[in-house]
Image (cartoon, helix red, strand yellow):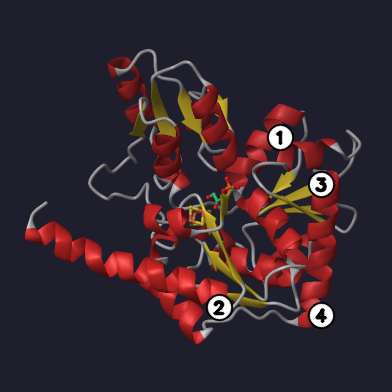
Amino acid sequence: MDCKNISAAAPDEQLRDEILRLKAEKNAVILAHYYVDGQVQDIADYVGDSLALARRAADEAANADIIVMCGVNFMGETVKVLCPDKKVLVPDTAAGCSLADSCPADEFEAFKAAHPDHTVISYVNTSVEVKALSDVLVTSGNARKVVDSFPKDAKLIFGPDRNLGAYINSVTGRNMLLWDGACHVHERFSAEEIIRLKKEHPGAPVLVHPECKRPVILLADKVGSTAVLLDYALASDAKEFIVATESGILHKMQKGAPDKTFIPAPPSDSTCGCNECSYMKLNTLKKLRDALRDETPEINVDPVQAEKARKAIDRMLQLS
Ligand code: 13P
Ligand code: SF4
């Protein structure tokens, strides 16, 4: 190993030691989403998709004193709603979500008021205020199951992701009213680029997150949440995969199947690197260490909004 590698490795090693020490001292638990940097995933106690993280938070409510959510703010809010008595920290409060931002609560409230006979189903990628306006929440891992739990003729609103909503409409035979929101990362995947890759790698199944646009979904061998795509990749006999979701998931795929090749689907503009969620990538080892050491930034939610949001989250957890 050359000197450059030694000096680059030392601070990370030190940070990891500090994180583990602080975590033990403070009885903290670290949760991380599959999209965060691999180093942060590796030090977390639990890595999962949005559904698994919500379930895990509900379980941790009884155990840890501090829960650090390495993901984006709406995930921290979900943890706080489920664990109101715990200190919930995030490494960086600038970690927003373009999808959650595409659904301002006041506009969603007006949309809901215009359709008073509809049940409101919201994706978990929303602010706590939008969750509070919802009858039930879903994640990409349980959206189909939750929607299927309603009678076929039920009048349903689905927000905020138009792509996930359209996909669920197509597989459940529904005609839910869709909020016109989207994720800037998933909207950028290009069907043309995936067709090109498929020609180069004819045996590679195409794995697609349902936040992608319909032409991309139509090319998929498997559509699902990050956890579903990971499980599929690990269980499949195929040796190569084309992956159309945020590239952080490749870390766990590659770790779980080092002999397989995972090819990130390029976005339509292949110079922009925008199959990375810049919000998720704000989570670094250093910020995680600082958050544990200083016990800030802390996520707090309005208790009235939280109580309403809790009902919608609990209903989701019961149905899935
Ligand atoms: P998952 O539901 O697969 O965890 O995805 C969350 C997300 O933010 C997708 O962009
Ligand atoms: Fe939000 Fe998209 Fe980032 Fe997921 S990938 S957190 S939906 S901006």
Q: Which residue is mark 3?
A: 156
Label 1: few (<14), some or many (≥20) within 10 Å? Answer: some
Amino acid type assigned to the residue bearing label 2 in the image: Glu
Q: Which residue is mark 4?
A: 304
- Left-right relation of 29 to 318: left
Amino acid type assigned to the residue bearing label 1 in the image: Asn
**Which mark is in front, 2 or 4?**
2
Q: CA distance from mark 3 to mark 1?
A: 10 Å
Q: Is residue 131 visible?
A: yes
Position of residue 64 measured from the top left corner of the image (x, y, whole percent) = 68, 70
Is residue 291 depicted above or below 226 in this figure?
Answer: below
For the point 44% across and 17% down, which residue is it? 238
Q: Nearer the viewer, residue 187 or 88?
A: 88
Label 2: few (<14), some or many (≥20) within 10 Å? Answer: few
Ranked by sequence position, the earlier of labels 2 and 3 is 2
Amino acid type assigned to the residue bearing label 3 in the image: Leu
Is residue 113 depicted above or below 92 in this figure?
Answer: above
Amino acid type assigned to the residue bearing label 4 in the image: Val
Is disc 4 placed on a helix, strand or loop? helix
Q: Nearer the viewer, residue 214 or 229?
A: 229
Position of residue 76 measured from the top left corner of the image (x, y, whole percent) = 61, 68
For the point 42% across and 33% down, which residue is it? 243
Q: What number is the disc on residue 25?
A: 2
Q: What number is the disc on residue 169?
A: 1
**Which mark is in front, 2 or 1?**
2
Q: Is mark 3 within 8 Å of ligand 1?
A: no
Ranked by sequence position, the earlier of labels 4 and 1 is 1
Q: CA distance from mark 2 to mark 1?
A: 48 Å
Q: CA distance from mark 2 to mark 3?
A: 47 Å
Q: CA distance from mark 4 to mark 1?
A: 32 Å
